[in-house]
Amino acid sequence: MVHSIFGGIHLEGRKEGSRRKPLALPDVCPERVALALRMHAGQACTPLVKVGDKVALGQPVAESEQTVIHASVSGRVAAIEDRPHPWGGVCPAVVIENDGCDTPWQQGFSAENWQDLSESDLVERIAACGIVGMGGAAFPTADKLRAARGRVGTVIVNAAESEPYITADHRLLLERSEAVLTGLCILKKAAGAKHAVAAVEGNKLNAVEGLERTARRKGIDCRVCAVPSRYPLGSEKQVVKAVTGKEIPSEGVAIDVGCVVFNAATAYAVYQAVVEGRALTHRVVTVGGGAVVRPRNLWVPVGTSLNDLIQAAGGLRESEVRVLTGGPMTGRVQTDLNTPILKSTNGVTCLLNWEQGQRKPERDCIRCGRCVAVCPMHLMPILVAKELKLGGDPAELARLHTEDCMACGCCSYICPAHIPLVERMAQARNIVQGEEREV
């Protein structure tokens, strides 16, 4: 049974440019890659190599207590230096000159029959292969599984992909359905759960039908769930509500209601790690938007620059383009095309002026209540904006639960007065958090 979710908006998908084209396997061979040492939530990694070292594909080049970063190409370490980071600012990165040989690391991982491995062995393999959440948050997958052990009954693979332009997970489901479902089953065993669900938006019926056929043919024990096509259903709290009907509490996570959620690309990476013995070195990235000559999905080494990805998709039609990592609703604007992609980068979206929409002058609120109706977190953005106008009392802003805002942008999108409500929510959140730190 599929449950309804509160709020959200229906967006024009604009996915036709890339969703029908088969996944392009490594036709992107960058001259060098820059592996950012801050590639996941938590502590940044420390380099294991030095300038001048030769490295092989899949060799660990940096690590932290939580995860490992592996070389995504073979070659020579050219530098360890600050590079622009997709999340903003700069970050130290291990820069590797690609020799074009993809020489595998001789001490790599062996392929395993995952059904013979214990839960702890699976988690350790996932940790050693450097797998993190590949849908945005980049939380280390092994840590998530350890936290879920004994507390969850359902593992969900979230393939909703509700943002415009992004089709990376869709193509992965169409072309690697058995691997994704096997990865889901591995995650179910590692988490000690009883049930496995693959959640796909209802407007991707070819992916839904393909997963169902694969599950029946291969005898894979999971349920394929077609969820409503509404943004921001790709969020953890919304997909849990749609699949199970359970409401995640304020400031809570899916584990609190007996579920754990992973992205479809994460499930595929888990399959590669356990069944094929491959570390997380490559991922699928959608290069899309009206400014791209040939929008498509590419299988690329982690650390590839945005410029290399765009050139692999035919380049840009115009010079005045807005480039984002991610989709147009939650993606981050990038001003330097030398910025490398991370393990969690699912798309590079290049927008023409007409696609961005002109920023219209802000007007007075007409109290229509649309922002309240579309907020998936049951918040009241306009009351937050009103309080900020009055001076922004931290106690009053905290009472409005600004910490629950997921910055989906629905409120700003729907506002007829063109009030930048998502920015006001972020401002209010910063005020409340600043007050808490002072206390």
Image (tube, helix red, strand yellow):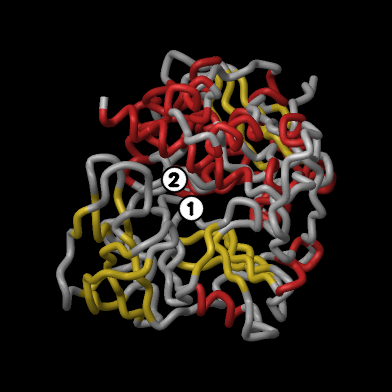
Q: Is residue 233 above or below residue 315?
A: above
The outermost residue toward the front is 390
For disc 1, the marked residue is: 344
Give the crowd class for mark 2: few <14, some 14-19, many >=20 residues within 10 Å.
some
Q: Is residue 332 left or right of residue 220?
A: left
Q: Quadrant of residue 281?
A: bottom left
Q: CA distance from mark 2 to mark 1?
A: 6 Å
> Is 429 or 181 nearer to us in this picture?
429
Q: Is residue 349 above or below residue 326?
A: below
Q: Position of residue 251 (x, y in %)?
A: 48, 23
Asked whether the viewer can see residue 171, the reply is yes
Q: Is residue 317 above or below residue 81?
A: below
Give the crowd class for mark 1: few <14, some 14-19, many >=20 residues within 10 Å.
many
Contact between marks 2 and 1 (CB within 8 A): the answer is yes
Residue plotted at (33% across, 62% down): 36
> Is 387 or 272 nearer to us in this picture?
387
Q: Position of residue 178 (x, y in %)?
A: 65, 44
Kind of element beneath mark 1: loop
Q: Quadrant of residue 336?
A: bottom left
Asked whether the viewer can see residue 183, the reply is no
Residue plotted at (27% across, 57% down): 60
